[in-house]
Image (spheres, rainbow, N blue to C red):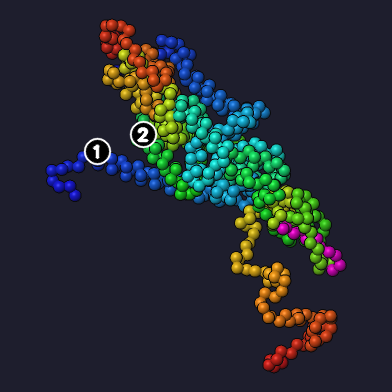
Amino acid sequence: MPSEGTPLSPQRRRFLQDAARASGGCVVAGSLLAWLARDARALPAEALRPPGALPEKEFLSACIRCGLCVRDCPYDTLKLAELGVDAVATGTPYFTARDVPCEMCDDIPCVAACPTGALDPALDNIDDAKMGVAVLVDQENCLNFLGLRCDVCYRVCPVIDEAITLETAHNERSGHHAMFIPTVHADHCTGCGMCEKSCVLPEAAIKVLPARLARGSSADHYRKGWEEKEAKGGPLVEGLIDLPDRLPGPGTDNLAAPGGFAPTYDLLGVGQ
Amino acid sequence: MSARTHMPVGMEAIQERGRLRAHKYLLLRRASQLLFLAVFLLGPWCGIWIVQGTLAGSLTLGVLPLTDPLILMQSAIAGHWPEWTALIGGVIVLAAYALIGGRVYCSWVCPINPVTDAANWVHRRLDLPKGWQPKRSTRLWVLATVLIVSGTTGVIAWELVNPITMLHRGLIFGAGFVWAMIIAIFVFDLFVARHGWCGHICPVGAFYGLIGAKGLLRVSAANRTACDDCMDCYAVCPENQVISPALKGKPGSTPLILSPDCTTCVRCIDVCAVDVFKFTHRFDDKVAAPTDPVPAPDPRAARPI
């Protein structure tokens, strides 16, 4: 505390008051802005970023919202989010696959147009784009799952037979037909949205979702035994005896019931 | 206060020079604002692609990149180092405004300026109280806040609310609810705070004020000896604290308006009936000698209104 006789200057008091007031105001305004910034990261699932877009968090630090990618998109796929209309961060580019999907131009004009690198210029092959991952979300309404031959999503896929394949399965209902199940392979899927756009149902049974929703992830320590074994060319543990697998049915080594599964399998020590 | 201060602002200039010439710089400025908007709109509206993009970032004639340096700065603070195209564009804009005078952007380019000017015009007409007047340093605090929030959240923070780029982008790409924001700014400037947005809050103006602090283009009160204290320049000036040091400076002090707050809108030249102000460069600090060797008569006595 100041001693008697050395009064504090009024300028000092004024300065401290003003500084406190200004910083208080800035904390309030800054908090509001930070809340908006947090809000801006919530990209709706149906909004897809252009090819090469950085992960959403980095994208919002890089995209200056100039719209040059939109201008250079020859198919008018991309649009800029409008304030209060689209739930995407205002002014940032996105597309909705069901409306206009990405046509996957070879020269990727949107990436070339981006001045800041929010669309990563390292993307030089459109097949490496990861805009999202197609997921056959509704197996109950998908015509192929009903045993019909729609196949449209498979046919329109720009990476046909790699990103979407048709896997045959037995049709239990009819008992003597095959079902051709459209199966997405995420490694090859670019998320262009052609499949979602073309799905013949009123609401698409196959949808492109952002990878965060579409994919699970394997734990780091998981190893697939069969792959490891093949890579090594033998059992992974030395001296392990590889016993024959006991399978039901003829032609196996099931000695207890040659030719098939024993219906009354007698469990040792269990009274029956 | 004399009755003359209640005459409509600029009336004497209109009587002296006619309505058109008394609005010369205002009209030029509107033309410039329209021109900057028009070159961006010619593409999407008429298919004439001179400029693509928006004020945030653009490409002129397919070769000249221009980028808003404040947005780039926020981007860098948020953790993204922009590619060369954006950096070169930012440096060009930065250099241009540092050379000319930063806040020329505010009054000759910015699309929000007509909005706040309109609010101020109505404000003057209705003779409303000036309302909340935060300190002039507020916008610097806002600028600092914006940069800090960009750093902490990793998002280009001001672009979440920036009415300048939102309005500009809205006109070019589709507006959504941007009009509500523009109305909010108009109402804020009209009823809450006179010259509130551009004069006290906007961090973009603060930023351009800082980079253009040593800009060449300046207004000089060269003929300040002729001033008849009508106060019209103070009434129209959006940053009227910049006038006094030049206009009312002691003999020997510079007549140049050197404050970086001056937007070089030069409305002061328009409304001055006795041609005190002129458009010049920052090294021209000549003060015109009184034309009449006899001291000018007291204007209050000279014009008995």
Residue at disc 2, secondary structure:
loop
- Dividing the picture into quadrants, the one containing residue A229 is bottom right
Residue sitting at x 41%, y 11%: B15
B87 sits left or right of A164 in the view:
left
Bounds of the magenta segment:
A175-185
Disc 1: which residue: A11
Res. B224 mark: none
**Closer to the camera in the image, B304 or B47:** B47
A41 sits left or right of A217 in the view:
left
Residue type at mark 1? Gln
Q: Position of residue B133 (x, y in %)?
A: 35, 34
Classify mark 2: residues with Cα within 10 Å, few (<14), some (14-19) or many (20+): some
Classify mark 1: residues with Cα within 10 Å, few (<14), some (14-19) or many (20+): few
Residue at disc 1, secondary structure:
helix
Disc 2: which residue: B136
Cα separation between marks 2 and 1: 17 Å
Residue sitting at x 39%, y 44%: A26
**Closer to the camera in the image, B19 or A181:** A181
Label total for image: 2
Q: Which residue is at the far top? A: B293
**Closer to the camera in the image, B68 or B301:** B68
Quarter holding the C terminus of chain B?
top left
Residue sitting at x 42%, y 18%: B280
